[in-house]
Image (cartoon, helix red, strand yellow):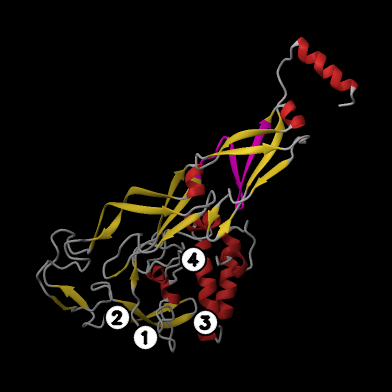
Amino acid sequence: MTKDYYAILGVDRKATKDDIKKAFRKLAQKHHPDKGGDENKFKEVTEAYSILSNERKRREYDSYGRTFAGGGAGASTGGFDPNQFSGAQGQGSPFGEFDFSDIFSGFSGFGDIFTGGEGASQVARGRDISIDIEISFKEAILGARRSMLIAKVSKCEECVGTGAKKGTKMKECSVCGGSGRMHETRNSIFGAFSAVRTCKECEGTGKIPTERCNVCSGHGVLRREEEISVSVPAGIDNGEMIRLPGQGEAVKNGTSGDLYVKVHVKPHPIFKKEGVNIVMDLPIKITDALLGSTVPVTLIDDKVLEIKIPQLSNAEETLRVRGKGVHAQGAQGDLLIRVTIALPKKISSRAKKAISELKEEGL
């Protein structure tokens, strides 16, 4: 379920940056672990602020209920990245003048609350990405498979993401001594904190290549076009998102992010979807409405169905054809046919005479 970041901070959806900042500062001091607060609540309000204080992430959250800008290592599926607190203050930080690297990277007595303890090692995670596709109404009802080329950061096929030249060995990182972690003490507006960080040289692995891969220059990843196949399930709605785990951007020595596909369904000139039912209007002649008739109707799967129009059918009367709607996830909808009376643009003298006789009969 999507988190309501506005409710977490106790602000309105139209709240200004200053409103959000004030709400966060108050809650951060209240729930700070070193001040006896709730650690999980503290992380929750921090996550909410990391999204709502960033204009781009806030727009994505308001539009999709999540963000896609997680940025390389450590990016989370919700768009919240604990590693982003290690960025510099100012333009490079998603928080503007707040220097959260001093506040949240680690806590005395708690280890690193974002990695589960001082000895824990956080697995790097690639960035989530999103794309939009447009499909026909028929594809939305029956399901489809689409293939497309996407330019994204992918794992280097030469070194399989290690960054090392094929056939060479890895060696111990001289910066962290092979631990993959760096210990620091920093000051913040809340006081001094003991922080445990991932080593930037080896990216937390404790190993570095003796020779770098000559394809990716040791990065383990590179940007290239990759063909992605998307299975569109039958019965999908306009604006619905399809999640493809592991199909997002790759990161060295970590797991790939996810790909989110937003589906746009083109309107159909005849059919509409209402839940699991398909709805259409069927214009019939006055005589067919009075006397009854059988009318051929072409369905969304191009099959032709003979629809029986009962005698004395009223305008806007709905006929139900069971089992001819959406078939998806065990549900089986119906085809709903709304009968409309199609009046002629002009009538002959003979027709006028016949209608006059009907009028005399009280019809």
In screen coordinates, is 272 left or right of 174?
A: right
- Do tag 3 and tag 2 residues touch (Cβ < 8 Å)? no
Q: In this view, does 74 lie above or below 340?
A: below
Quarter of the image that includes the N terminus: bottom right
Q: Give x and y (percent) for residue 46.
A: 51, 71
| Highlighted range, magenta | 265-283
What residue does disc 1 label?
A: 118
Mark 1 or mark 4: whose residue is earlier in sequence:
4
Q: Given the image, on which type of amino acid does mark 4 rest?
A: Ser
Quarter of the image that includes the C terminus: top right
What residue does disc 3 label?
A: 39
Q: Residues within 10 Å of mark 1 (few under 14, many from 20)?
A: many
Mark 3 or mark 2: whose residue is earlier in sequence:
3
Magenta span includes 281: yes
Residue at x-position 53% and y-position 52%: 235
- Do tag 2 and tag 1 residues touch (Cβ < 8 Å)? yes
Q: Given the image, on which type of amino acid does mark 1 rest?
A: Glu
Magenta stretch secondary structure, dominant: strand
What residue does disc 2 label?
A: 181
Q: In this view, does 298 lie above or below 245?
A: above
The Cα–Cα distance between marks 4 and 3, rounded to whole angstroms, is: 16 Å
Q: Given the image, on which type of amino acid does mark 3 rest?
A: Glu
Report helix, strand or loop for mark 1. Answer: loop
**Residue at the far bottom in the pictured view:** 109
Circle on res. 50: 4
